[in-house]
Amino acid sequence: MSAVQRLNVLLVEDHPGLADNIVDYMALHGHQVDCAGDGRLGLAMALQAHYDVVLLDLNLPRLDGLRVCRALRESAERRVPVLMLTARDRLADKLDGFAEGADDYLTKPFELAELLARCRALAQRPRVHQPRLLALGSLRIDRQRHEAWRDDVRLALSPLGYRLLLMLAEAAPAALSKAELCRRLWGDEEPASDALRSHVYQLRQVLDRPFPTPMLHTVPGVGLRLESDA
């Protein structure tokens, strides 16, 4: 997708003034925006039509944004990128959104230019058109259900552990640096100094410890890599 290609966007936002501003700005730059003022209507529209990006407010009438995102991930035939729009700026709120399947998070108030830039970036991500199931050796990951299995054993992953595993699986066999992993997991929020190490340890306990062949490897001076056990 080129940067000038027209985007087809769904905006689920119950604040008329903000919705009008977004629609006008996007139209000015050649993009189409459909609007829904509540969560149930937004979910129905997202499941019925093909959108490049869904802009989803967190606090919505009838069905809140987290439940909309969860239902979209469970029911949609393709993975449409979801950008959460909300006044909540706590890290816990962001992690809740990511756990339900959000791809990015923008805190109100925001600049419309940044909103458009994030929409373009999300629409160009290769994983948008990837199939629901990802396989690497004995590992199977269901992107819609946010679940993973190894040798048909369901892995008891935390939401952040699942995201860490998915990022490494999508990058495999390439390694991801610790700085890149931290950026993707926490964004601009500065994590505790040992946060990544703790989550990597927990992931190893679930992914590798019960099985004869480890899949998660440390690459000295580089970062982490997931290797097939096949």
Image (cartoon, rainbow, N blue to C red):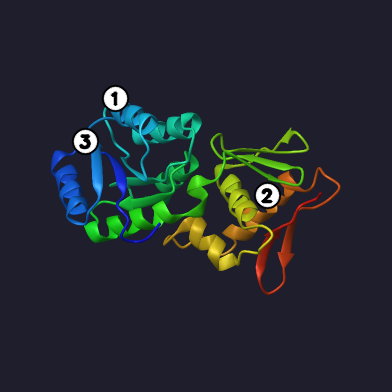
Tag shown at residue 14: 3
Number of the front mark, 1 or 2: 1
- Residue type at numbered disc 3: Asp
Relative to 182, 117 lies left or right? left
Question: Is residue 102 at all visible to an observer of this figure?
Answer: yes
Look at the numbered discs 2 and 3 and tell me whether their residues touch, using CB distance below 8 Å: no
Residue 84's spot in the image, x, y percent? 35, 45
Relative to 211, 50 lies left or right? left
Q: CA distance from mark 1 to mark 2?
A: 37 Å
Q: Which element carries disc 3, helix, strand or loop?
A: loop
**Within the image, what quadrant is residue 168 found in?**
bottom right
- Residue type at numbered disc 2: Gln
- Residue type at numbered disc 1: Arg
Q: Please tell me how crowded label 3 is: few (under 14), some (14-19), or many (20+) other residues with Cα within 10 Å.
A: some
Nearer to the camera, 184 or 46: 46
Relative to 150, 107 lies left or right? left
The residue labelled by disc 2 is 202
Nearer to the camera, 195 or 19: 19
Q: Which element carries disc 1, helix, strand or loop?
A: loop
**Within the image, what quadrant is residue 18 found in?**
top left
Q: Which element carries disc 2, helix, strand or loop?
A: helix
Look at the numbered discs 1 and 3 and tell me whether their residues touch, using CB distance below 8 Å: no
- Mark found first going from the N terminus, 2 or 3: 3
Nearer to the camera, 198 or 3: 3
Q: Is residue 118 above or below residue 210?
A: below
Residue 68's spot in the image, x, y percent? 38, 32
Q: Please tell me how crowded label 2 is: few (under 14), some (14-19), or many (20+) other residues with Cα within 10 Å.
A: some
Nearer to the camera, 118 or 124: 124
Residue 36's spot in the image, x, y percent? 24, 33
Residue located 69% across and 54% down the image = 201
Residue located 30% across and 60% down the image = 4
The residue labelled by disc 1 is 62
